Image (tube, rainbow, N blue to C red):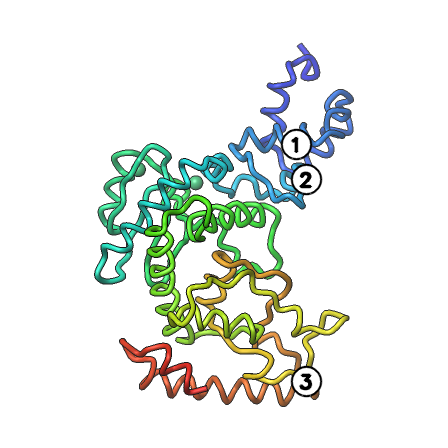
Amino acid sequence: MLFQDLPQELISQVVSNLNKRDILSFLQCHASSYYRSLYDSFWFDLCRLHGIRYCHPDISWKDLFCSDQVSSMCPHLNTNLFTDTRFIREKKQLLWSSFDQRTEVKDHELCLHPSCDFSGESESCTDHYAATKHNLSIKIAPLHTLEIWCNTCVKTIGFDYFASNVKQGLKSESYIMKKLTKKLALVTQETDSQELALSITKGRQEIESGIFRIQFRNSTMHLVEKNWYTAWLAFISGQSTEIPGDLNNESLFLFDGSLNPTLSLGKHFELIGNLTRWYIERVYSISGKIISSNELLEAPEYCKLAHSIRIRQQMNQAARYSAYGSNGRISKVNSRY
Ligand SMILES: [Zn+2]
Ligand SMILES: [Zn+2]
């Protein structure tokens, strides 16, 4: 029996384990597979054989498979989770009511298995996974709030913070993670009870003001648009209950995409730390670009801008020992600037 006479499923099975280069040379000499590969469903089947059934909407299944990233993506994540409204409603209720009951922010996880209502501190979660093999959980922890963790893959899902040029696989994983996180962290007027909406608002204010207080420790700084920042501060300090929308930094950039050198700190933009940036990216979303102070060009026109950031950095360092103390209040910190 020749290889080409094997049923398509078996051929797909073999092909799904090849790397991009070998697949492309295989397709050159196997006509029926070559014709199939002109359709994206061929590539979807290959991804599916790795357990991956999700993809960023801007990427084709072919792009995803050929990025050689499929094997490092989490196969436990699935889009059914966030399209199932009952699942979202129940998990949301569990997540935020358990948050309400805690007196201090300790590492706390909620199991995301559809038929499980387990939640608890991280150590007891480890035992839970050992006993049940339930993979996914969502965290509420000072440094990892609203991260989705896979216990089988042993990794945080969609964590693309360090990737300067985000790979297709990670981009897809990140996309699904953000959708799920948002569903669990946002108030939905139509379905959430008043009581739940209140505990989400209170919970997020507490979490985000905590992140705000510790954000600059040993951290790179990132430039964010002033109006969004002001709205965010109003929300986390409790002056407003309105949760800001996506962070859009468009006003900071010129038509050619470069940072506008005439911006001034405090008037047009403010600074956030790494931790806050990563949190904002996953819970609020950043539309468009975000730039860090390290990425500022050496060009002379950025000299003034870079200087003002350095001064602020030094002020933050000094403030760490006073206003950013363990119970430093946002309103106090805010009024300093
Ligand atoms: Zn996984
Ligand atoms: Zn569970």
The residue depicted at 29 percent of the width and 39 percent of the height is 117
Measure the alpha-carbon separation of dots 3 and 2: 40 Å
Q: Amino acid at mark 3?
A: Thr
In the rendered structure, the answer to whether residue 58 lies left or right of residue 115 reads right
Earlier along the polypeptide chain: callout 3 or callout 2?
2
Which quadrant is home to the N terminus? top right
Taking 141 as reference, is 274 above or below it?
Answer: below
Q: Secondary structure at mark 1?
A: helix
Task: Say which residue label 2 marks.
Answer: 60
**Residue 35, percent across and down?**
77, 24
Judged by depth in the image, the label closer to the viewer, 3 or 1, is 3
In the rendered structure, the answer to whether residue 214 lies left or right of residue 125 reads right
Q: Which mark is residue 164?
A: none
Which quadrant of the structure image shows residue 247? bottom right
Earlier along the polypeptide chain: callout 2 or callout 1?
1
Earlier along the polypeptide chain: callout 3 or callout 1?
1
Q: Does ligand 1 reach within 8 Å of label 3's beta carbon?
A: no
Count of labels shown? 3
Which quadrant of the structure image shows residue 152? top left
The residue depicted at 68 percent of the width and 75 percent of the height is 259
**Residue 189, percent across and down?**
46, 50
Q: Which mark is residue 262?
A: 3
